[in-house]
Image (cartoon, grey):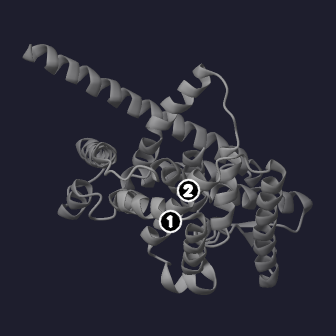
C-alpha cells in the first residue's frame, strides 16, 4: 500500500504536473468536487514514504546487527536496474551516450539518482546503533527523545530550518518512532480514536489547501503537496498504527502479501529511473490532455495499478532468472 502511494505521488508530481500550473476550475459544483477528490487523493498518498521507514523501524529496532544481506539486496537491485534500463534505452537508440548519464547510472547511490535509496541505505547503516540506543532507554526516556526529535523534525517552527532538505534526519526519527511502537505499543490501540485523529489531520490539511487557494482569489485551484516533515508526519503515524491494528487471518493471504512485499521496492526503482520517468509520465500527460479532467482520479488509480503490476512482473522475471542461473551454475560445478 505504501508503494502504491509512492506511485500515486509521482502521478501527481510528474504526470499531472501539479507544480507547473495545473489548476481545477471550481466555479461549478462538479469542478469543486473534482478538486476535493484530487486533493484528498494526494493527501492520502503523501504518508507513503514515511510509512515505509516506520515499518523498517518497527521490525529492526530489536536487532542491533548490521543487515548486510538486506543492504546488499537494496544496493544490488538499484544498481542492476539503473544500469540495465540505461543500456536498454541506449541499445534502442532512445538516448545518446554521455559520460554524465553513464556515471549517474553506474553510481546511482553516490549521485543521488534515487534520493530515497541513498537516504534509506545510510539509515540501514545506522540502524544497529539506533537499535542499541533505543533498547537501553526506558519508556519515559524514549518518549522524551521522540518529543525532542519532533521539535527538531516538524516543519514548524524549527523543522524547516533544521531538517528541510535533509531526509536522513527525518528517516532516523521515523525509524525511532516505529521502534517505539514495537517496544511500548504492542496492545492494539483504540481504532475509533485512531480514525478520529486520522480524519482530523486530513481535514486540517484539506482545509489548509482550500484556504490557501481561496486567498489567491482565483477560480482555478491548485492541488498542493506538503512536506514529509509537516502535517504528513502525524498523519503517517496514524496511518501506520491503523494498519498495525489489522489482524490478518489465513496463511495463503499472508503468503501473497509477503510475496508482493518482497518485490515492492523494485516498483520504485524501475518506475522512478530517470529515463523511465520521462517516458512514463510524458505518456500519462498526453493521455490526460485528451480526456476531461473529470476522469483524472480514475486515470490516476488505473495508472498506479498498471505501473505497480508491470514493475512487479518485471522483478519476478528477474528473480526467477537469477534463481535459474544460480541453479545452473551450481549444477555445472558438480
Give the answer, above or below, for where 262 lies relative to 82: above
Closer to the camera in the image, 46 or 284? 46
Q: Earlier in the sequence, mark 2 or mark 1?
A: 1
User: In the shown orientation, is residue 276 left or right of residue 304?
Assistant: left
Is 59 placed above or below 144 here?
A: above
Q: Quadrant of the N terminus?
A: top right
Q: Residue at x 70, y 67 (%)?
A: 223
Left of 166 or right of it: where is 220? right
Mark 1 crowdedness (10 Å alpha carbons): few <14, some 14-19, many ≥20? few
Image check: 43 left or right of 176?
A: right
Under tag 1, what secondary structure? loop
Q: Which residue corresponds to the image point at 63% horizontal and 71% vertical from the top-left?
A: 21
Q: Quadrant of the C terminus?
A: top left
Horizontal and vertical percent for residue 304? 59, 43
Residue that carries the numbered disc 1 in the rendered image: 137
Seen from this angle, which residue lies furthest right? 29
- Residue 311 spot, x, y in % from top left: 45, 37
Distance in Å between CA atoms under marks 2 and 1: 15 Å
| Marker count (numbered) | 2
Q: Position of residue 32 (x, y in %)?
A: 85, 63
Name the one closer to the observer, 132 or 207: 132
At label 2, counting other C-alpha atoms closer than 10 Å, the crowd grade (few under 14, some 14-19, many 20 or more) is: many
Dot 2: what SS? helix
Instruction: Spot the residue most to the left.
Output: 333
The residue wearing badge 2 is 178
User: Measuring 48% from the left and 48% from the top, which residue is drawn there?
Assistant: 280
Residue 133 placed where, x, y %? 42, 64
Amino acid at each position: 500500500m505504501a508503494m502504491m502511494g509512492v506511485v500515486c505521488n509521482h502521478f501527481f508530481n510528474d504526470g499531472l504536473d501539479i507544480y507547473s500550473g495545473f489548476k481545477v476550475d471550481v466555479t461549478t459544483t462538479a469542478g469543486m468536487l473534482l478538486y476535493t477528490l484530487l486533493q484528498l487523493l494526494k493527501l492520502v498518498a503523501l504518508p507513503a514514504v514515511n510509512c515505509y521507514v516506520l515499518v523498517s523501524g518497527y521490525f529492526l529496532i530489536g536487532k542491533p546487527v548490521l543487515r548486510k544481506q538486506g543492504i546488499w539486496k537494496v544496493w544490488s537491485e538499484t544498481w542492476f536496474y539503473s544500469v540495465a534500463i540505461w543500456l536498454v534505452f541506449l541499445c534502442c537508440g532512445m538516448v545518446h551516450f554521455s559520460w554524465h548519464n553513464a556515471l549517474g547510472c553506474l553510481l546511482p547511490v553516490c549521485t543521488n539518482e534515487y534520493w530515497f535509496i541513498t537516504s534509506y541505505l545510510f539509515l540501514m547503516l545506522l540502524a544497529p546503533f539506533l537499535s542499541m540506543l533505543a533498547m537501553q532507554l526506558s519508556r519515559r526516556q524514549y518518549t522524551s527523545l521522540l518529543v525532542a526529535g519532533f521539535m527538531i523534525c516538524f516543519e514548524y517552527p524549527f523543522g524547516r530550518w533544521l531538517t528541510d532538505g535533509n531526509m536522513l534526519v527525518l528517516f532516523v526519527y521515523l525509524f525511532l518512532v516505529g521502534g517505539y511502537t514495537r517496544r511500548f505499543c504492542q496492545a492494539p490501540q483504540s481504532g475509533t480514536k485512531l480514525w478520529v485523529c486520522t480524519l482530523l489531520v486530513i481535514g486540517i490539511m484539506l482545509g489548509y489547501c482550500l484556504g490557501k487557494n481561496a486567498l489567491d482569489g482565483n477560480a482555478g485551484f491548485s492541488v498542493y503537496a506538503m512536506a514529509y516533515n509537516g502535517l504528513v508526519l502525524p498523519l503517517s503515524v496514524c496511518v501506520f498504527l491503523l494498519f498495525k491494528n489489522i489482524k490478518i487471518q489465513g496463511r495463503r493471504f499472508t503468503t501473497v502479501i509477503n510475496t508482493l512485499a518482497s518485490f515492492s521496492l523494485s516498483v520504485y526503482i524501475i518506475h522512478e529511473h530517470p529515463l523511465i520517468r520521462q517516458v512514463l509520465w510524458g505518456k500519462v500527460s498526453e493521455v490526460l490532455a485528451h480526456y476531461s479532467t473529470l476522469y483524472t482520479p480514475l486515470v490516476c488509480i488505473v495508472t498506479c495499478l498498471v505501473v505497480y503490476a508491470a514493475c512487479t512482473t518485471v522483478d519476478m522475471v528477474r528473480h526467477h532468472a537469477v534463481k535459474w542461473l544460480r541453479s545452473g551454475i551450481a549444477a555445472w560445478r558438480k
